[in-house]
Every structure is written in structure tokens, then in C-alpha cells.
């Protein structure tokens, strides 16, 4: 029993240590060479943020951003997204950046291990429920990213979260073909649909970073290409669960209230939670996790709790009742021990007094009733 579970725990921790997403932030000057590197060879870079802060308020940077839509993050994406390591010099690799003057260039990126990337089409992704240990975050990319994408057949992903949990999609990179004269007239299309309603569709890079939060617990993502192989990057999307799915109700209890941050469970009349011996339990959701050990302790019958505690109930003494039993047993033993020690001490005091009485033969002491000491 012990060995298989130990090996399983070991296996899970090894698996998780390979399946990681590590967030990194680097800063450098605009004309300096910036090296983005992932420690593990099987990890690739995903750019989350790239900001340039000119030291000179008069810098043409702000003007360029508004007028020419020059964004350092997009330039960085073209060079670094989806590879294991890269070097980037803002003034050289971002067209127009040379005239922005000096400033602080800061990049936030993630190193994402291979195991956290879904890279095959027609994949169903199921996010883990609240009672399961699992991974609620990852990346999706098309086969061939960042070198090419494939067409003819649709590439589809479906993400499902447990009920009441939502899904956040962050479109980190998107580069598909549009018609020559209009970049918004897409030839190929990336589309996000929720229950047949399109909530996003485009073929172009997005700035600022586009974040979509679904209303429901399911989303369909499609990449449609017109030709069988297109020499563009394709798409890179981050997905994560937001909010908490409602955990299972305890035995003999039920959910009474639920909003985005709180859930309240109550035991049926005459029952209490086995661990707290209270009827109500409020739990808090933070990020996508409940701040509570799940599953919740079962509700146990109030009238039977005392009987359970003293081990008189014939059948079905559950784990918690056993724990409470030891909670009662230990103090009881201590009280009995104290009682015994007390009696022994009193016995010696009595003996000592008796001897003193014998020594001094005082008449008043001799008349003292012995029983009053016990
Ligand atoms: C990116 O950086 C800018 C400027 O520092 C900040 O306003 C924005 O919230 C950041 N976005 C993310 C996703 O970190
Ligand atoms: C550049 O900006 C980052 C983030 O805003 C900050 O942590 C860093 O200290 C800045 N570096 C310099 C040289 O100003
Ligand atoms: C994904 O789910 C859809 C619909 O439930 C199903 O038709 C399809 O076969 C599934 N794909 C995989 C790879 O399991
Ligand atoms: C959820 O309910 C709790 C308890 O009633 C309340 O304190 C909290 O403000 C509510 N949160 C939201 C987002 O409505």
C-alpha cells in the first residue's frame, strides 16, 4: 500500500517539475543586447509584456506608437516567441526604435515546458475540478509554430472547465495571412467561440495583449487556413482557469450560497461538520483555488457524535470520529493519572502527619479526623 503511493507521489512531483511555466523579467537599455534564454532545452519562450520607457519625455516613441503602431512587444514576438533562446536589440530589431533615444526596455516572458503546450490539432483540454490535483494553466499553439502553420483542415481545440469556473485566454501571438491590400480582410482566420457565439476573430497581431474571459465553462478555438502550408507563425495562446468550481457537497450537507469569491455549505438539521462540530462552513476562492482542504469533511449526526466519541456506536466509526475519540481519550487518561498521583501524595502527607503526631504526642493533633484528608 505504502510503496505504490510513494512511487506515485514521486512520479507526480517529477512530472510536475518538468511541466512548468517559469515567469522571468529582464530589463536593459534600448541599444543593449538582450538575451532571452530558457534553462531547459525543452522549454520555449512566450512573451507577455515588453515595454519601453524613454528617459526623455520628448522622445518620438509615443508619437510612433500612436501614428505608426510600432510596438516593441510585436517586434520581440517575431524574433523570440516559440524558441528556446534568442537575442534582441531594440534599436536594431524593432523598426524605428533607433530614433527613440535612450530608455529602459523591460520584457516579461515565460519559459514554458514542452509538456504544458498543446501542439496538436483537434485536442480536448479538460481543466481539473476542485477536488483533483491538476494543472489549470497552459499554452496552445498550432503545429509548426513559429515557423509555419498548416491548412486545408481546420485545427480545433476545445477547453472545458468544471461548472462555474471560467476560462481566460490570452492571445500572445497571432500571425496569419490577410489579403494584400487590407490587413483586416483575413484570408485565414483564428476564431474563439463560446456556445456558437464568436467572441474573437482575427488574423493579426494584437496590441495591447488581448485577454478574453469566457462567460461559461467551455470554449471552442479554431484556426482555419486556406492553403496546406503557410509561411507565417500561426498562433500562440495562453489558457488558464479563473474562479473556482463548486466543490462537492459534504454527505448530509448542501450548498446554500455561492458567488465568485465565497461558498457556504450547511449540514442538514441535526448534523454538524465532523471537524468543527459546527453546522455552517464558509470557504473562500482565491484565483482558481479554494482556500480550504477539499473534499470537505462530512456532516455527522449531532446526537450520535457523543456516542461516536466514546466508541459505543457499533458500526461505522469513521476517521473523524476516531480522531475525536483520541481527542477525548487522552485528556481522560491524563485526568485519571493526575487523580492517582494526587491520591499518592495525599497518602504520603497523611503518613508524614501520623509520624509527627507520634513524635510530639500532641493531643490536639491526635484528635484530628483522618477521613477529612481523603
Ligand atoms: C505590461 O506593462 C505595462 C507597463 O508597465 C503595464 O501597465 C501592464 O499592466 C503590463 N501587462 C501585463 C500583462 O503584465
Ligand atoms: C527598468 O524598469 C524596470 C521595470 O519597470 C525596473 O525594475 C528597472 O529597475 C528599471 N531599470 C532602470 C535602469 O531604470
Ligand atoms: C473532442 O470532443 C469532441 C466532442 O465532444 C469529440 O467529437 C472528439 O472526438 C474529441 N476529440 C478527441 C481527440 O478526444
Ligand atoms: C460574496 O459573498 C460574500 C459573503 O456574503 C460577500 O462578502 C462578498 O462581497 C461577495 N462577493 C461578491 C463578488 O459578490
Image (cartoon, helix red, strand yellow):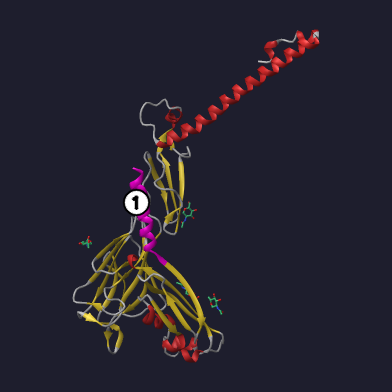
- Relative image position of residue 175 (x, y in whole percent): 32, 80
Left or right of residue 315, residue 371 in this image: right
Q: Nearer the viewer, residue 314 or 24?
A: 24
- Location of residue 88 in the rendering, given as x and y in whole percent from the top left corner: 43, 83
Residue drawn at x 39%, y 46% is 295
Q: Is residue 252 above or below residue 233?
A: above
Q: How many marks?
A: 1
Ligand 3 has an atom within 8 Å of the beta carbon of the residue at disc 1? no
Q: Which residue is mark 1?
A: 8
Give the residue at x 18% y 76%. 152
Quadrant location of the N terminus in the rendered image: top left
Within the image, what quadrant is residue 311 found in? Answer: top left
Magenta-span inclusion, residue 141 = no
Determine the secondary structure under disc 1: helix
307 or 83, which lies in front? Answer: 83
Q: Is residue 4 magenta?
A: yes
Q: Is residue 270 visible?
A: no
Image x and y of residue 178, in percent: 28, 84
Q: Nearer the viewer, residue 265 or 224?
A: 224
Relative depth, front residue between 60 and 96: 96
> Which range of residues does the magenta coloring cover?
1-21
Q: Residue at x 25, y 69 (%)?
A: 120
Crowdedness of circle 1 by 10 Å Cα count: few (<14), some, many (20+)? Answer: few
Q: Is residue 302 left or right of residue 184?
A: right
Amino acid at each position: 500500500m505504502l510503496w505504490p503511493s510513494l512511487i506515485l507521489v514521486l512520479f507526480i512531483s517529477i512530472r510536475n517539475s518538468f511541466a512548468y511555466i517559469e515567469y522571468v523579467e529582464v530589463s536593459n537599455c534600448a541599444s543593449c543586447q538582450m538575451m532571452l534564454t530558457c534553462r531547459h532545452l525543452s522549454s520555449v519562450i512566450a512573451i507577455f509584456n515588453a515595454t519601453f520607457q524613454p528617459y526623455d519625455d520628448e522622445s518620438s516613441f509615443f508619437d510612433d506608437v500612436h501614428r505608426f503602431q510600432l510596438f516593441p512587444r510585436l517586434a520581440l514576438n517575431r524574433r523570440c516567441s516559440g524558441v528556446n533562446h534568442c537575442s534582441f536589440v531594440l534599436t536594431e530589431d524593432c523598426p524605428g526604435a533607433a530614433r527613440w533615444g535612450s530608455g529602459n526596455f523591460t520584457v516579461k516572458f515565460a519559459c514554458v515546458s514542452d509538456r504544458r503546450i498543446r501542439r496538436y490539432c483537434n485536442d480536448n483540454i479538460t481543466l481539473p475540478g476542485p477536488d483533483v490535483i491538476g494543472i489549470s494553466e497552459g499554452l496552445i499553439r498550432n503545429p509548426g509554430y513559429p515557423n509555419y502553420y498548416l491548412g486545408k483542415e481546420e485545427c480545433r481545440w476545445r477547453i472545458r472547465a468544471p461548472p462555474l469556473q471560467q476560462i481566460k485566454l490570452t492571445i500572445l501571438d497571432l500571425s496569419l495571412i490577410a489579403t494584400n491590400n487590407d490587413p483586416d480582410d483575413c484570408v485565414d482566420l483564428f476564431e474563439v467561440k463560446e456556445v456558437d457565439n464568436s467572441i474573437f476573430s482575427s488574423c493579426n497581431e494584437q496590441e495591447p495583449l488581448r485577454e478574453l474571459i469566457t462567460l461559461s465553462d467551455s470554449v471552442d478555438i479554431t484556426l482555419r487556413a486556406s492553403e496546406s502550408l503557410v509561411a507565417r507563425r500561426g498562433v500562440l495562446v495562453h489558457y488558464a482557469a479563473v474562479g473556482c468550481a463548486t466543490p462537492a457537497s459534504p454527505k448530509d450537507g448542501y450548498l446554500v450560497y455561492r458567488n465568485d469569491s465565497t461558498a457556504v455549505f450547511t449540514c442538514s438539521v441535526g448534523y454538524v461538520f465532523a471537524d468543527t462540530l459546527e453546522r455552517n462552513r464558509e470557504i473562500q476562492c482565491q484565483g482558481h483555488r479554494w482556500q480550504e482542504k477539499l473534499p470537505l469533511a462530512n456532516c455527522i449526526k449531532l446526537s450520535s457524535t457523543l456516542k461516536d466519541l466514546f466508541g459505543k456506536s457499533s458500526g461505522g466509526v469513521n476517521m473523524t470520529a476516531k480522531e475525536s475519540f483520541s481527542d477525548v481519550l487522552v485528556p481522560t487518561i491524563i485526568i485519571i493519572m493526575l487523580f492517582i498521583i494526587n491520591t499518592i501524595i495525599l497518602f504520603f502527607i497523611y503518613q508524614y502527619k501520623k509520624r509527627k503526631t507520634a513524635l510530639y504526642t500532641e493531643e490536639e493533633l491526635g484528635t484530628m479526623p483522618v477521613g477529612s484528608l481523603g
